[in-house]
């Protein structure tokens, strides 16, 4: 088992290197190895930066770091690249397109990374976002069940059966057309705004333990709703979510920046 694991890990390393290391290779020639060159292949250097970049990805993936193995994979990669160039594979249109895509992805990621470090998110913006988060997360949570029917008449028949002493759970299993029918109509805990508006409006007007007096129509059909329970929610502390909120604001500003770039650019898209 141990030897199989070692072989599998080495195979994963080879694939990862072949897919990513080309982005970090250098051009030019070097006959002697310096501190910034770990190997040469037919005079073409493989830089320390290439090794460091791949090593970082290996470590982040949880694989065991083996510098010698990575260098040998980089050597193989450069050697195979030279062989491919010798038969002009890089001149093929498909390869040119893929190389351009890879180039664009690397440049875009690097630019966005640089831009994210330049964007300013003030403490006031973070606090305002937290206040909005608290206002939304302070909404009560409901636990409800429902019986979904295809038409109003069938829903009214269910309400009559309930008024006559029928079991909500049994009627849900027998008559509901929704997937929750198998579990007696139970929808679990949720906030009202996570449901369609008609369902939410009916739910918020109900008392705990009651069943809707009339069927509720939504885009999914006709519902008979039972409010099982209701509870208040407590928002996490500012300190607990500050970093997440700040990162979210940076992400939103990046999205806004891309939107602005698109508005300023001459873009034509095939119909």
Image (spheres, rainbow, N blue to C red):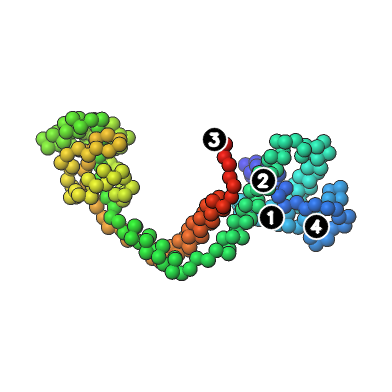
Q: Secondary structure at mark 4?
A: strand
Q: Is residue 59 visible?
A: no
| Left or right position of 114 against 203 | right
Q: Position of residue 87 (x, y in %)?
A: 82, 36
Which of the two discs, 1 and 2, sits closer to the camera? 2
Q: Residue furthest right?
A: 31
Q: Which corner quadrant holds the C terminus?
A: top right
Q: Secondary structure at mark 3?
A: loop
Label whose residue precedes the other's in the sequence (2 or 4): 4
Q: Residues within 10 Å of mark 4 (few under 14, many from 20)?
A: some
Instruction: Specify the label residue 271 is tagged with.
Output: 3
| Left or right position of 162 against 25 | left
Label whose residue precedes the other's in the sequence (1 or 4): 4
Front-most of residues 213 and 74: 213
Q: Which residue is mark 1?
A: 53
Q: CA distance from mark 4 to mark 3?
A: 49 Å
Q: CA distance from mark 3 to mark 1?
A: 40 Å
Q: Which residue is mark 4?
A: 37
Q: Residue furthest bottom?
A: 123
252 in relation to 86, above or below:
below
Label whose residue precedes the other's in the sequence (4 or 3): 4
Q: Secondary structure at mark 1?
A: helix
Q: Position of residue 174 (x, y in %)?
A: 24, 30
Residue at (55% x, 50% y) in the render: 262
Label whose residue precedes the other's in the sequence (3 or 2): 2
| Left or right position of 141 against 91 | left
| Left or right position of 124 against 98 | left
Q: Residues within 10 Å of mark 1 (few under 14, many from 20)?
A: some
Q: Which residue is mark 2?
A: 102
Residue at (73% x, 57% y) in the render: 49
């Amino acid at each position: 088992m141990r030897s199989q694991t070692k072989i599998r890990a080495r195979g994963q390393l080879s694939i990862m290197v072949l897919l990513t290391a080309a982005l970090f290779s250098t051009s030019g020639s070097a006959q002697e190895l310096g501190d910034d060159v770990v190997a040469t292949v037919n005079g073409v250097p493989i830089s320390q930066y290439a090794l460091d970049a791949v090593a970082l990805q290996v470590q982040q993936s949880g694989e065991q770091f083996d510098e010698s193995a990575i260098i040998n994979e980089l050597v193989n990669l450069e050697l195979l690249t030279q062989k491919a160039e010798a038969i002009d594979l890089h001149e093929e249109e498909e390869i040119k397109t893929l190389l351009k895509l890879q180039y664009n992805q690397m440049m875009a990621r690097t630019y966005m990374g640089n831009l994210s470090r330049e964007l300013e998110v003030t403490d006031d913006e973070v606090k305002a976002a937290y206040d909005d988060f608290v206002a939304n997360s302070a909404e009560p949570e409901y636990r409800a069940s429902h019986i979904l029917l295809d038409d109003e008449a069938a829903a009214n028949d269910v309400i009559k059966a309930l008024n006559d002493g029928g079991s909500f759970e049994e009627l849900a299993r027998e008559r509901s057309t929704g997937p929750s029918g198998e579990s007696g109509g139970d929808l679990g805990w949720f906030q009202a705004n996570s449901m369609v508006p008609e369902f939410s409006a009916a739910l918020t007007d109900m008392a705990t333990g009651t069943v809707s007096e009339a069927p509720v129509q939504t885009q999914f059909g006709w519902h008979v709703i039972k409010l099982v329970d209701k509870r208040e929610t407590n928002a996490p502390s500012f300190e607990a979510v500050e970093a997440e909120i700040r990162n979210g604001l940076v992400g939103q500003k990046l999205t806004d920046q891309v939107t602005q770039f698109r508005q300023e650019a001459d873009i034509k898209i095939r119909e």
